[in-house]
């Protein structure tokens, strides 16, 4: 496994299937009772493969919605919320990612990192998945 071969698996289309846009609205509906109350959309992105750590690197990108303020949204506490929230369902997402690997590897451990502010309208929550080649 290497980053280049994994990029052919984790295309934008596959990433959108793994974490559909509707999941953001479902999350805000569950959290606030109204999907329009959310200040951002959540999109899964593939960052690469760390061979030394045998780990897949993804981000849950928080993209500011028009007319909203991402900086005001207290995104720094989200890794803890996302790790437990049934709508975000990180455990299920990791299982789906493992299926996309087509038997090349087994996902053994996952971890959400601290929120990183990439810019005013983009924050990212790193998702690291340790894999064991089969």
Image (cartoon, rainbow, N blue to C red):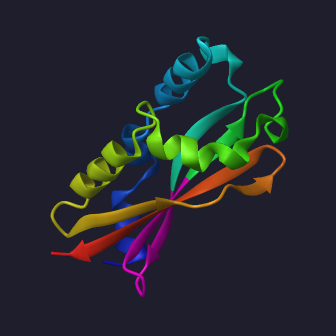
Q: Is residue 53 magenta?
A: yes
Q: Is residue 126 above or below residue 134?
A: above
Left or right of residue 116: residue 43? left
Figure quadrant of the C terminus: bottom left
* Front residue (pair 86, 127): 86
Residue 31 found in image quarter = top right
Left or right of residue 22: residue 129? left
Q: Is residue 5 above or below residue 39?
A: below
Residue 52 image offset from top left, x and y in percent: 42, 88
What residue is drawn where x is 58% and y is 49%? 79
Residue 21 image offset from top left, x and y in percent: 50, 30
Q: Is residue 89 magenta?
A: no
Q: Which residues are magenta?
A: 46-59
Q: Residue furthest top?
A: 33
The secondary structure that most of the magenta stretch takes on is: strand
Left or right of residue 53: residue 94? left
What residue is drawn where x is 41% and y is 44%? 13
What residue is drawn where x is 41% and y is 46%? 90
Residue 61 image offset from top left, x and y in percent: 61, 48
Q: Residue furthest bottom?
A: 52
What residue is drawn where x is 34% and y is 47%? 91
């Amino acid at each position: 496994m290497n980053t280049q071969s994994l990029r052919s698996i984790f295309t934008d289309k596959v990433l959108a299937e793994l974490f559909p846009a509707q999941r953001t609205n479902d999350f805000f509906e569950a959290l606030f009772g109204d999907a329009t109350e959310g200040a951002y959309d959540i999109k899964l992105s593939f960052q690469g493969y760390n061979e030394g750590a045998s780990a897949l690197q993804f981000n849950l990108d928080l993209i500011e919605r028009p007319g909203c303020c991402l900086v005001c949204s207290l995104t720094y506490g989200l890794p803890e919320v996302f790790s437990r929230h049934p709508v975000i369902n990180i455990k299920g997402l990791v299982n789906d990612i493992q299926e996309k690997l087509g038997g090349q590897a087994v996902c053994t451990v996952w971890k959400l990192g601290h929120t990183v502010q990439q810019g005013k309208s983009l924050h990212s929550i790193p998702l690291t998945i340790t894999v064991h080649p089969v």
